[in-house]
Image: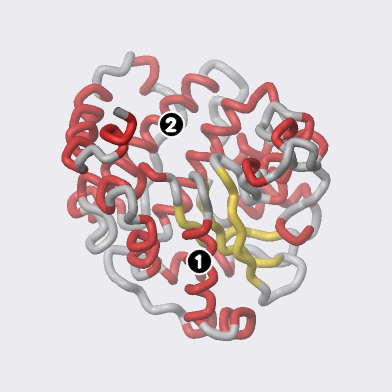
Amino acid sequence: MLLQRVLRPQSSLRAASVLSRKTSTALPRFQTRGLHLVPQLTHDKFFKENGIPGLLSREGFDFAWTQYQTFIVDKLNLLTQDTVDADLKPGELLIKYSRRPEMASLFNYASMAHNNHFFFNCLAPEPTPMPKNFETEIIDTCSSIESLKMDFLATANAMFGPGFVWLAKNLEREGLIHIFCTYNAGSPYPGAYSRRQPVDMATHSPDAPLGNQYAGSMGPHAQNQKTLAPGAVDVQPILCVNTWEHVWMMDYGIGGKAEYLERWWDKIDWQVVYDNYNAVTAAKSPRTQANKHRSLGML
């Protein structure tokens, strides 16, 4: 029975997508009046009409962006309506509540709204050339563009479970970039280091410092973690890929993650990534974190 459900044809997933679109219009009116809205993407109109050619079908894009982001935003509005958080952006909320285990639900929806937006906003309808100055920066750090691609896709392929893989700029040493994972709704920002969720907790024994008894937002580890970011450095994300199954399974099937990642690389809008790279400079203090986020225009 379980195997039959897992191996159900993709047509069933598409049917579920159509059903979801129909039922979403029946949401109570109070769920759609919140201050949080689904943001516009860099290529919003084209994607809605055509999908992302060579990466996601129109149905796949609608499911992974329009429907999913609407669901997340509706949940965020329900959790913040009539509160002091109603007019705060997702990026501000995830920083604010990263060290509040009792606010885990609000953090999760805010962080997912931000991360999913970051992912889709860095995509283009057609392959875009990498700016020469950025290419030079990457070669200095990674030896070649191909090396960066191989390391990034290998990291994403090896990631077991849903999450995001990030490319980030080192704010302490100009020119250095990092590749790292965040699982589930974990955040890449140093300001939210308590909820970075950089590892698969299932790979740690129960008696380890990162063991299962400390896993998740409700455990003491979420409040007591001291490290700032991968490698104990201050980083600013400039690119990410979404590895949640709902993004790629409709178009690629159960075993299609590797193909999805390979095609994703060819749809990166490198100008947007370079703009993200140039939007921030060396870190000054933790209090400047929110300003650095706003400079990216992603929140």
Disc number for residue 31: none
Q: Residue at x 46, y 56 (%)?
A: 241
Residue, disc 1:
154
Q: Residues within 10 Å of mark 1 (few under 14, many from 20)?
A: few
- Where, quadrant-wise, is the N terminus in this rendering? top left
Q: Residue at x 57, y 63 (%)?
A: 167
Rendering coords of residue 230 (x, y %)? 71, 58
Q: Residues within 10 Å of mark 2 (few under 14, many from 20)?
A: many
- Image-based side of 27 in relation to 176, left or right: left
Front residue of 186 and 6: 6
Does 114 sit above or below residue 283? above
- The disc, 2 or 1, on the residue closer to the chain's N-terminal end is 2
Front residue of 253 and 47: 253
Rendering coords of residue 48 (x, y %)? 23, 48
Does 5 sit above or below residue 225? above
Does 246 sit above or below residue 152? above
The residue mark sitting in front, 2 or 1, is 1
Total number of numbered labels?
A: 2
Front residue of 84 and 243: 243
- Image-based side of 15 in relation to 285, left or right: left
Disc number for residue 73: 2
Secondary structure of the residue carrying tag 2 is helix
Q: Amino acid at mark 2?
A: Val
Q: Residue at x 61, y 46 (%)?
A: 200
Q: Residue at x 62, y 37 (%)?
A: 94
- Image-based side of 233 in relation to 139, left or right: right
Does 220 sit above or below residue 30? below
